[in-house]
Image: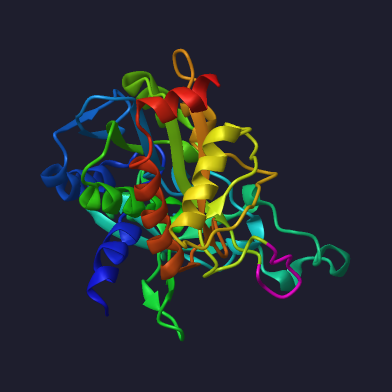
Amino acid sequence: MKKEYEILKKISLLPGVPGNEKKVSQFIASEIKPYADEVIYDNLGSVIATKKNNGPKVMIAGHMDEVGLLVTQITKEGFVKFQTLGGWFSQVMLAQVWEIHTKKGVVHGVTGVKPPHIIPQDKRNVAIGIDTMYLDIGVSSKEEAEKLGVEPGNMVVPHSEFIVLGNEKYLLSKAWDNRIGSAAVIEIMKRLKDYPNEVYATFTVQEEVGLRGAKTSSYVVEPEIAIAVDTGLANDVPGGESAEQSLGKGPQILLYDGGLVPNQALRQLVIDTAKEENIPYQEAFIVGGRTDAGHMHLAHRGAAGLSIGIPTRYMHSHTSIIHYDDYENTVKLVLAVIKKLDRKTVDHILFD
């Protein structure tokens, strides 16, 4: 495996659902401290790493949490009931293996539902409701489950592998939404030199349940420029519309999403920079979702906001796919943009 893939493997496989991102934040802090002048936290647990300087405040953020589950109940027969954390499409959850993280270690389970053989014929084509699902951990009583450490409040994450696919730039793993954005922000901080501003590399919590860490961390930072680096849709699949939503064709500079109409001058600066640096890019949009920029641009007096997406297939599932070039080109693009954001340019973006 290529050396540059090692951090992507580590960060994607870490467990960290909304409200339980500690292992991810500890890893990120250890990676980024040598490259930051200061690392602080908001009261929800978001990590804020600063490169200090004079000039405008530029906030670059990726969220740390992943979609997962929360244990809510154990039946007397030992089956585990759960609450989803983040958006799950019921059909991708069936017959999947999960990791329940307990104080005694990891307990594996599989999604269980009523067997199709006993579902009436006219009901078999109806999507199974998440509220009818449970986790089967291979025990026969609540007492057995409790002895393993399973209890309400346990974090549950998909059980997955990091796999380099047929084309070695196609990478499969869990939690690309949004560990790939977090990895990009780490790499941006590692490479950033000679910048005319104060840069806040931020790793937010609880994005998947309402952009909560973005709200609190942006109130700490008080940014003038706010850029969310998140995943975007890759729809270059059979039956999909691939235009501006393809793997390997560059980062997506979003036209809009459910929480943000971007600052048009900032968006144009990013596009112009991509052209000048010969970095491929796409102009996409998200109808049914939003990114951390939705809250970041509203802190205090407001900020010029923009979302940049790294195309991802099969988001919010056990196995998503990204293209390494999209990650690398996102890093290059954001680095080039940061270096242009001096006082004069930011004032033009905000006020002209």
Q: Is residue 201 above or below residue 169?
A: above
Residue 117, compared with residue 284, is above or below; it is below
Q: Which percent across, then down, holds residue 52?
A: 19, 30
Q: What are the residue bounds of the magenta stretch?
A: 236-243
Left or right of 278, for residue 113? right
Residue 343 rendering spot, x and y as whole percentages: 36, 25
Q: Position of residue 163 (x, y in %)?
A: 38, 76
Picture quarter with the N terminus = bottom left
Determine the residue positioned at 40% across, 81% down.
168
Q: Nearer the viewer, residue 177 or 74?
A: 177
The percent coordinates of residue 297 (x first, y second) are 50, 26
Q: Magenta region, mostly helix, strand or loop?
A: loop
Residue that appears at 41% across and 24% down = 224
Magenta stretch contains residue 294: no
User: Looking at the image, which residue is at 64% across and 43% down?
Assistant: 255
Query: Which of the pair 143/331 is nearer the observer?
Result: 331
**In the foreground, 208 or 324:** 324
Query: Residue 165 versus residue 264: which sits nearer the camera?
Result: 264
* Residue found at the far left of this picture: 34
